[in-house]
Each structure stands twice: as structure tokens, then as C-alpha cells.
Amino acid sequence: MNSRDLVLGRVRRALADVPRDDTPPGPGRPDPDARYEQAVGRSYLREHGARSVAETVDLLAENLADYRAIVHRATEDELPHVVARLLAERGSRHVLVPPGLPPAWMSAAQPARVEDRAVSTPRELDEVESVVTGCALAVAETGTIVLDGGPDQGRRRITLIPDHHICVVLVPGQVVASVPQAMERLDPARPLTWISGPSATSDIELDRVEGVHGPRTLEVVLVGGA
């Protein structure tokens, strides 16, 4: 008897009292021991509770703040001035701008703009104080921002190296209630980055340290109607 037979024998003995009429996970399985397996239900809720659009956006704002993101609200006309104010309050002299960021968003900002270039080194990106991007989606129930590398977001590294990230979320078009709803709209072939608050970690004594794997400060601007 080899090691494989020994291990499988122990598994079979451990499963000896399992009813043999349990449903296997799929038809046509060649393994005779599949009769011991039982299919796992996949009937996930698409969202937890019924909410209006306004309630969903409020839940997003609440959960973002719970993760220590700083949440702002603005109309489209107010957005350029909000972005300019946040950069001024931060004291940013340079700001990273993805190639497809709408020009109007930065029309009132004063810092020098640094374009997302493939030749930029991590050291060069580390000298930039802030980055401004859009997003692919925002998930209300988890307070999560999803980036997919779109033209208004740029490559993943520009949102990981600068210490300050301003992310614009268009309301309600880019807000979904739940993760299942988000997965239906996202392209799995794209480089998805899921962000729930600023980057943080804890050591063995649970001392929280922010800014280890990404920006220390995440500011989210929810842009909607008046």
C-alpha cells in the first residue's frame, strides 16, 4: 500500500457514516467517491434589503466613512472647486492625472500636473503628493471603490504610490448596492483593484498603521445632481 492509498483509506473511513444518497456536485463524475459529496447552494442574495437610490448612496457614504475614507458631496459644477480645495488643503505641489481624466475636473486646480507615463519610476511617483481618478464602480454595502484601469483611472500603480488619493464617483450611475451586482457589471479580464478605505495594516498587537500598501488618505467625492 502506497501513501496515496493510505490517505484515501483514512478519508473513506472518516466518511463511512455519510448517507450515500447525498447529491454530488455535478453529473458524470468518474470518481465513485463523489457520492459522498453534497452540492453547495449558490443562491446568493443580490442585495440585502430594498433601498431607494438615495438610501443606497447614503449607505455608501456611511460605509466609506466607517473605513476612514473622507467623503464629500458635490454637483458637477462644484466638482472642480472641491478638487482644487482638497489639493490646496493637502498642500500638494504635484498631482498625478490619468490620461482620460475629464479636463473639467482639474480646471480650478493649481498644482503642477504629472501625467501617468510608463517610464515613470516608483521614486518619481513617490515624489507626487496626490492623485485624482475616477472609478469603475462603488459598492454601497461594503463601502468599496473598484478601479479597472480605465482611461480616467490610469494604471494601478498611480493609485498605490502617492500618499493622497482623490476618487470621484458619479452618482447614481456608478453606485451599486452589492458585490453580486458589481460583478455583473465588471469585466474580469481587466485589472480590478478593490479599495475599502485608505491602505492599512495591523501588527500582532493590533496597532493600526495606515499608508503601508497604498495611500494614507483616501478622499471620495460623490458627484450627483443639485
Image: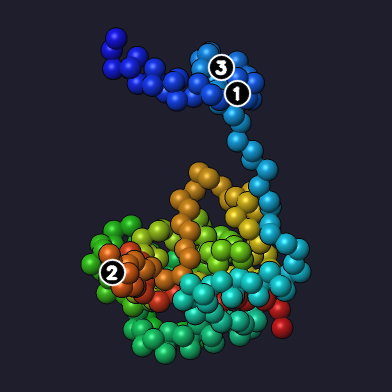
Q: Between residue 173 and residue 22, name the one nearer to us.
A: 22
- Specify the amino acid type for callout 3: Arg
Eye-nearest disc, 3 or 2: 2
Question: Helix or strand or loop: what does disc 3 sit on?
Answer: loop
183 displayed left or right of 52: left
Image coordinates of residue 43 in percent, x first then y, are 68, 43
**What residue is disc 1 on?**
19
- Specify the amino acid type for callout 1: Pro
Q: Is residue 158 above or below residue 165?
A: above
**What residue is disc 2 on?**
205
* Among the two numbered marks 2 and 1 on one chain, the one whose residue lies closer to the N terminus: 1
Q: Between residue 120 and residue 31, name the one nearer to us.
A: 31
Eye-nearest disc, 3 or 1: 1
**What residue is disc 3 on?**
29
Which residue appears at 48% of the width and 72% of the height?
A: 67
Q: Between residue 165 and residue 115, name the one nearer to us.
A: 165
Quarter of the rendering containing residue 22: top right
Quarter of the rendering containing residue 23: top right
